[in-house]
Amino acid sequence: MADIVASSAAARASGRTSLHKVMQRKSTIAFLMALPLILMIFILVAYPAGYAIWLSMLNKSMTKFVGFGNFDFLFKRATFWEIVLQSCIFAITAVIFKAIIGFVVAHFVNNIPTKGQRKWRGMLLVPWVIPAAMSTLSWLWLFDPSYSAFNWIFVHLGLPKISWLGEAGWARFSVILVNVWIGAPFFLIMYLAALKSVPEQLYEAASIDGATWWQRIWFVTLPMMRNIIAITILFSTIVTFANFDIVRVLTAGGPLTATHVFATWAFKVGIESGDIPLGATVSLFMVPILAVAATFILRDISKRGSEV
Amino acid sequence: MVSRKVSRRRFMANTAALSAVGVAAPFVRGAYAAGKLSVGFWDHWVPNANGATEKLIKEWGEKEKVDVQIDFITSQGNKLLLTTAAEGQAKSGHDILAQNTFLPARNAELLVPMNDVMDQLIKDNGKVNATVEYLGKVGGKWLGVPATVGSQIKGPCSRIDLLKKHAGIDIQAMYPAGEAPKADNWTFDTFLKAAEACHKGGNPFGIGLGTTSDNVDTIGAVFHAFGAVMVNEKGDIVIKNDQVRQALDFYKKLMAFLPPDVAAWDDASNNKFLVSGQASMIMNPPSAWAVAKRDAPQVAEQCWTHGFPAGPKGRYAPFLPFFWCTWNFSKNQSAAKSLLLYLSQSSSAEKMVAASGGYDLPSFEKLTTFKTWAEEGPPKGTLYHYPNPHNHQILSVAAAPAPHKIAEQIYNQGIQTQMAVRYFKGEPLEKTLDWASGEIEGFMRN
Amino acid sequence: MANAAVATAGAVRPLRYGSISRDRKWALRWSYFFLTLFAIFFLMPPFYMLITSLKPKEEIAAITNPWWVYAPTLDNFIELLTQNAYMTFFRNSAIVSVCVVIVTMLISVIAAFSLARMKFWGSATLATGVFLTYLIPDTLLFIPLFKMMSWVRDTTGIELVNHWWTMIILYPTLTVPFCTWIMIGYFASIPKELDEAALIDGATWMQTLTRIFIPVALPGIIAATIFCFTVSWAQFLYPLAFTTSTTELVLPVGIVTTLIKGDVFNWGQIMAGALLGAAPPLIIYAFLMDYYIAGLTAGATKG
């Protein structure tokens, strides 16, 4: 299709020359080139998203319009608020730890001689490359109640066994740990690239002014990396907040509902319990929170951009 | 054209032969069964048990000139449930699909009535128990044929040596192979004491309290044994009664003697706990033992499957039936019925039972005395009491007798185990009951 | 603790020259020490996957040292690879991923060029829209998509549910926005003089794209391709919700739903399956790491 557009464009381009027409033609061609993208977004993303809103206003058997009945129903349930809280704790904690670990490890990698960096970077990025569902399986086996390899070490060190996925607190910890494990390398790579783009002279200048390591990080590194930190946090928040694979494979939401997040609960309610409208309602709650995060961070970036 | 005629004639001959051995099939006779048939069966947990079903279906397929495609679908991670939901939504899928517990009732309007098949089977193989009837027959309509494959009683499977050592119980004397049980003392009190002793001895009972079926089935039977009803037949929430409180108190006591992480257990956790040699008892059909036989023989030799302890209102055991169902949008319903009839004959059932090492349990009265259960070992006779041969316990399903729609949700969401865990974790009993009552109200949505 | 290392390294820095180099040496040692710790943390699960996959069944069932293999065997791999089902999953995954890469790159490179360089009425809004698409997670879309599929079947008779090729239609919704975004960033960074010169020389827009932009932005395209492949290979929710037959499953769902069987002790095979499933992205990454990283970072910083 691209070729057809190209050749017809070429044919027409050779004909007329009026500036106005060229502009008009240029925008037509541009529109045609973006058309597949537009169609895809409208048919497979925008329409189903709107349809989800419609579904969320139907009754369970999808025969009657109930307006905000499903929302009303959810708001009255303790489980729902528990899941709101968990989704937030889960996303916020995981993103913070990913960012911190990524930042710290990026500094270590940046500290060592350049020729060794490639090797370390290669090893440290592995968790990001393995498909999440598969690496989570190995965590599941590491956490197994009867065969936990961690507990084996603990017992040999004289420490008590931990029921990694069995107690609400530990299960939340485990889910966050796996999420950090998978996501931290992404931050590491981003920050490493950003560190390299900070001009060495700035550090030298700071050193001459007698800045401590902390001042150098606070006044040189962080401001220089501000954009990239914002961008990575935005991305990671989105991915973490909508996460399904890890919780699904690791705990399936248990024990009780202690590790359910919006995505897994929507799946449980909508598909497994056959209440499609309620499932759609639950999943809709992911949108506003993400939208807030996005506008907040995007605005921040453009503000910073205009200051510079 | 010619070949089709031939196959049709052949099919007729086969049908006639089938009726001759005692299985009359009026609804298949004359129907054109040949063609294609796709079946989705439960993926067996006993190693290599799928083989028998596959062989039987192939035999049937060759005889009937039907090209059968078999999928084995695991129930782990709710895969089977998802498949059923997907096919019901899409109005297309397997001609025969294994659906467990409450699924046939959920899909009642989409399933072909099996009354003709069931009348015949009950005539040949004897009655079915009340739980099968509650789950499989809605408004006088049989929604499926109770499947041999996968149907199971989840009774206790105990370690002979560990029970003796820690609790001083000789389980083999209580449940002697080949004889009626002498288990009058085997009550909840004895059970709790044994649980405590085994916990002290370092080999606790492995009873899960997650929300998957093994866990829910166990607590369901305990509730029944206390006469604890949460929702009655009419669909009224009657959860605030003393029986429910007693059942929860019992579980609170029991949980103190269980491993600390039972709230997160799934259907595999108890098996792993047994196979790893840590458990003195788990509640499971013989798959755990079968796996131990292969991977940890020294554990398997000490396993003994037996009956449930009795509660104040009787001795209840959890029964989890699978049904073979046919969608009403299936293109080849007559062939499906013919296959189901074939698979439900005594000889077929016996082969499935044998291949599954005694795990599979036909729901029909006359089919509970196959040799497999008496002979399987080691130790010999370990499965003798598994199929409840002396009708010593009442087979039940959690959340009955609530209306199916509500019972299914109570079952799937593991409301009972969740209540037990909440109460155990220190929530006041009335608050737990309020919580459960609120959840159940949610299930009544239309 | 990590900061402490940096502290000892940095705090005394503005001293005599000799001590700086001694401090550097210590900073270096600490860096290596902590990097080793982190590397152990990051590589432990895949390592554990590997050793478990080499264990025979009895050894997994017994309570022995889980971190050691006493009787290594390849049985788990052999059993897995001689199973038709696993090979089917692998094949489905491979075909789906390759097709998704092609479809995605065609759509996103062309669209990104038009959005970055040509502009048309609403193109800025569309660029933002592409970004916003990211905010709508697959976990929200799969329920309505499922209902849409039954509508398609009812009106056209085309069955979309339970076919692996349906994934080729669905996955681009996850890959196209990010790839377009990366490519817009890349194209925007190419100096305007380049394409202006080409246009003045009489090249068409399409020629400008294929002769100038694509070669110049090749690292970005390779990076986007790798990203796209990784995402398609790893996607879990859509195939979990839309496919059920063993012949139609892709790898992650196949492993999770058919290898984990409640009561059967299959962990050797599960780990072998997961390891083989993780292999294609790992291999690609091992050979094209620099493109992978360069593209990922450049796309994100410039977008």
Image (cartoon, helix red, strand yellow):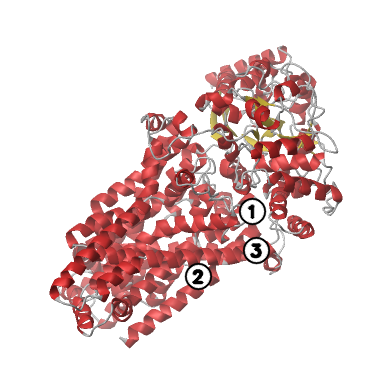
Relative horizontal placement of residue B25, taking residue C113 as reference (left or right): right
- Which amino acid lies under the numbered mark 2 shown in the image of this protein? Leu
* Comes first in the chain, label 2 or label 1: 1
The residue to which callout 1 is attached is A256
Alpha carbons under labels 2 and 1: distance apart:
26 Å
- Which amino acid lies under the numbered mark 1 shown in the image of this protein? Leu
Mark linked to residue A290: 2
Residue furthest front as drawn: A158
Mark linked to residue A80: 3
- Which amino acid lies under the numbered mark 3 shown in the image of this protein? Phe
Residue at image position (30%, 55%) is C36
Mark 3 secondary-structure assignment: helix
Mark 1 secondary-structure assignment: loop
Instruction: Look at the image and tell me whether residue A237 can be seen.
Output: yes
Picture coordinates of residue B425, whole percent (x, y): 68, 55
Name the front one of labels 2 and 1: 1
Residue at image position (22%, 61%) is C218
